[in-house]
Image (cartoon, helix red, strand yellow):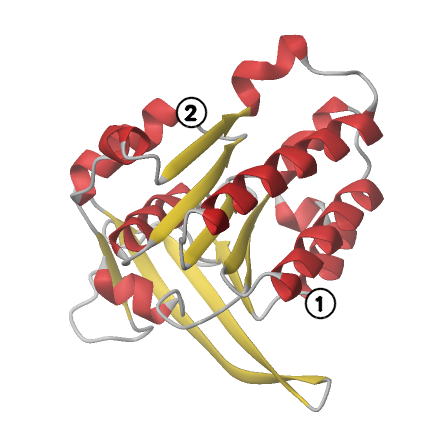
Amino acid sequence: MALLISACGFTEPRKFVIINENCDTDGSFLISSLIGQRLRQQSSAIVLICCHQSLKFYETCGKKLGYNLIMSLNKKSLVVIEKLRDVPSMTSDPDKLLDQLYAEINSHVNTFKSNGIKNVSVIFDDITFFTNLGCTEKDLIKMSMKLHKLTKECSELSVILKVGLSDLHQYLTNNIEDLSDVSITVEKLKSGDFWDVDGKLKIKKVKCENGIYMTESERNILYYVGDHNVKIIAPGEHGLKI
């Protein structure tokens, strides 16, 4: 997992990370790995917004990857907002829905800050979930811009957004990518499925110099999700069985 975290740039002081999950792929392993890495940091806390998977799912993954979410909840270093569970009681007004969510996130972030937490992460495991509740892609872009602005105002904060079915939400993806300093695209291999490769990660890191955003680096890596770890492989690496 450490190699995956490092390759994706999660160990670096990145403020706004986008994970684009293409059709027929599942980027939940990135969210699970990221949660473990952030919880292991000193003076850290997470606001996890579950829209694609449940808390139980991440709890099970955590046990396989060596961290305990229930312990983090009890220590109050983790706050979980389960939107899948809250659907029946949600407002039907998309604007109010996102405004309420932003206010709730901001409240938790301010609470962590007041408690002296130095590293706060807000993680959405699928922001496109809200399109099923009447929100448009423009609404989600506005929400993303508010979160991006919040990272500028709060030095302790970083935001990670996963965009499900990103290749079907190109307008949303392109606009959110413009805000990011790391974008990771999870996609299938064009040549098909293999025994020991599940897909490819396209990792793009961006830096800002004098107000101008420029590409810092781009790389592709292959990945395989096992029961207790994620293996990464450089394309063309010796020993890859096809």
Q: Position of residue 22 (x, y in %)?
A: 56, 48
Which is more toward the observer, 77 or 198? 77
Left or right: 133 in relation to 47: right
Which image quadrant for residue 191?
A: bottom left
On screen, residue 192 above or below 56: below
Other residues around mark 1 within 10 Å, as few (<14) / some (14–19) / many (≥20): few
Q: Mark yes or no: residue 239 visible.
A: yes
Q: Position of residue 71 (x, y in %)?
A: 23, 32
- Which quadrant would the C terminus be assigned to in this image? bottom left
Q: Mark yes or no: residue 227 visible.
A: no
Tell me the CA gap for discs 1 and 2: 29 Å
Name the residue at the top extreme: 88
Other residues around mark 2 within 10 Å, as few (<14) / some (14–19) / many (≥20): some
Q: Residue at x 30, y 73 (%)?
A: 234
Q: Are marks 1 and 2 in contact (CB under 8 Å)?
A: no
The amino acid sitting under disc 2 is Ser
* Secondary element type, mark 1: loop
Q: Position of residue 176 (x, y in %)?
A: 70, 58
Name the residue at the bottom extreme: 210
Checking the image for residue 178, the label placed there is 1
The amino acid sitting under disc 1 is Asp
**Chain-order first, disc 1 or disc 2:** 2
* Secondary element type, mark 2: loop
Which image quadrant for residue 80?
A: top left
Q: Residue at x 49, y 54 (%)?
A: 187
- Which quadrant would the N terminus be assigned to in this image? bottom left
Checking the image for residue 54, the label placed there is 2
Q: Residue at x 58, y 71 (%)?
A: 181
